[in-house]
Image (cartoon, rainbow, N blue to C red):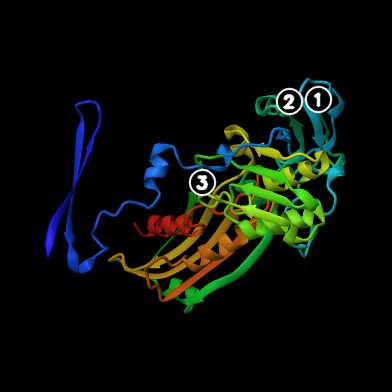
């Protein structure tokens, strides 16, 4: 039986809206306007996100200190001046990390693939937004203000190293992380030579910010017996546990990670939430207090990176009618200052590089570049969005 289901929405004002759905009982639940299970909680404000949970009475707040320059040497933080400010309890740095200074849960096969929790004095600053430390205090606003204004000393590199701040610069400098196995079908060189018409060029796609509603934030509750409960806005609960275990040097079974809601993520909280979570855990262990680390929107946008920019170089062969004969692609992807998720995102881009078309003679290569920009990462349909846009641009 087919019938119409009507929903009426009435406000206190004279405005009223109606939505009608043609429903068929034989296809239930398809075609039925079934509300999302927690939609009333979300729309009423009853739903709780990480930012909504309270700290214990002796709980403290934390704010990350980030680098404001890139491709320079980090020398020092003026922690003494910060500690003289009323309400500031501590400034956490790399010296306070009990075990591994890394937000990767495993040992990478080469040092340049690693990503430190906090830079150490003497380290090269890989990007603006790199983490230098954590200000801890009794007020969220206070610690965030101090973290923004704290004095940081940098020094120019002796070898006059120039930063790489665009994908084009990285391509010219051959600043390459890795290249992936090409995707091949048929014989693209022969297909191009036999094509009556031929065209080559570039398609550029920019990056994209995740812009989730709830910023990166974590609460680390210090429990009895040296246990920690971590309440984090993350897409990676198990990996968050592994990262904190590695940083603190304690077994994973002593760390409980809770994630009720991410507050939006779109890929931006797969790995980019680890800085926040690990910093909160280190601070909780040092101060012996529960810690809430939350990152303001503008700092979050600087630190988190986003969808990887892509430059696609193409050589396409086709008939006078427009029928595609052969296509050769080289995908150049900007990973930022670390590899993070970008190697797998480039792999996805290669997998989707022929889009939904069958191209008898086809080849796609992928190259991942290193720049002095915040580490890019997965963003909603990673890799595939950029390359499908490029292929459609080439064809149409």
Q: Earlier in the sequence, mark 3 or mark 2?
A: 2
Q: Nearer the viewer, residue 257 or 305?
A: 257
Secondary structure beneath dot 2 equals helix
Q: Tell me, for residue 82, which label it has, or none.
A: 1
CA distance for labels 2 and 1: 7 Å
Q: Determine whether 225 is above or below 15 in the image.
A: below
Q: Tell me, for residue 155, which label it has, or none.
A: none
Q: Position of residue 301 (x, y in %)?
A: 58, 38
Q: Position of residue 34 (x, y in %)?
A: 29, 54
Q: Earlier in the sequence, mark 3 or mark 1?
A: 1
Q: Position of residue 303 (x, y in %)?
A: 64, 41
**Residue 362 falls left or right of residue 91:** left
CA distance for labels 3 and 1: 39 Å
Q: Residues within 10 Å of mark 2 (few under 14, many from 20)?
A: many
Q: Could you tell me which quadrant the N terminus lies in?
A: bottom left
Q: Nearer the viewer, residue 345 or 97?
A: 97
Q: Tell me, for residue 146, which label it has, or none.
A: 2
Q: Tell me, for residue 206, which label it has, or none.
A: 3
One can see residue 93 in this view: no
Give the residue displayed 42% in from the left and 42% down from the top. Answer: 42
Marks 2/1 in contact by CB < 8 Å: the verdict is yes
Q: Residues within 10 Å of mark 1 (few under 14, many from 20)?
A: many
One can see residue 359 in this view: yes
């Amino acid at each position: 039986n087919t019938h119409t289901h009507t929903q009426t929405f009435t406000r206190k004002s004279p405005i009223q809206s109606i939505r009608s759905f043609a429903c068929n009982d034989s296809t239930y639940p398809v075609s039925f306007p079934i509300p999302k299970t927690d939609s009333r909680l979300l729309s009423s404000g009853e739903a709780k996100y990480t930012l909504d949970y309270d700290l214990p009475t002796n709980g403290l707040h934390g704010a990350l200190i980030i680098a404001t320059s890139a491709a320079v040497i980090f020398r020092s933080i003026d922690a003494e001046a910060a500690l003289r400010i009323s309400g500031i309890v501590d400034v956490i740095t790399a010296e306070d990390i009990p075990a591994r200074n890394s937000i990767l849960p495993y040992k990478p096969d080469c040092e340049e693939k690693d990503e430190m929790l906090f830079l150490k004095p003497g380290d090269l600053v890989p990007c603006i937004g790199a983490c230098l430390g954590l200000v801890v205090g009794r007020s969220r606003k206070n610690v965030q203000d101090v973290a923004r204004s704290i004095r940081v000393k940098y020094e120019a590199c002796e070898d006059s190293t120039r930063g790489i701040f665009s994908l084009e610069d990285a391509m010219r400098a051959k600043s390459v992380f890795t290249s992936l196995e090409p995707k091949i079908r048929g014989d693209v060189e022969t297909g191009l030579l036999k094509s009556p018409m031929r065209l080559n060029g570039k398609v550029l796609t920019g990056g994209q910010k995740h812009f989730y509603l709830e910023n990166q934030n974590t609460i680390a509750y210090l429990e009895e017996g040296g246990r920690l409960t971590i309440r984090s806005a993350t897409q990676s609960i198990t990996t968050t546990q592994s990262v904190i275990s590695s940083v603190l040097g304690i077994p994973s079974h002593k760390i409980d990670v809770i994630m009720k809601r991410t507050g939006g993520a779109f890929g931006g909280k797969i790995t980019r939430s680890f800085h926040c979570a690990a910093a909160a855990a280190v601070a909780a262990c040092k101060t012996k207090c529960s810690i809430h680390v939350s990152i303001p929107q503008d700092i979050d946008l600087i630190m988190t990176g986003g969808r990887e920019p892509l430059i696609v170089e193409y050589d396409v062969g086709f008939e006078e009618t427009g029928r595609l004969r052969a296509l050769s692609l080289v995908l150049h992807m900007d990973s930022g200052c670390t590899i993070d998720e970008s190697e797998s995102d480039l792999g996805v881009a290669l997998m989707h590089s022929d889009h939904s078309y069958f191209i008898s003679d086809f080849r796609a290569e992928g190259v991942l570049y290193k720049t002095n920009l915040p580490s890019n990462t997965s963003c909603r349909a990673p890799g595939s969005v950029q390359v499908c846009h490029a292929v459609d641009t080439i064809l149409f």
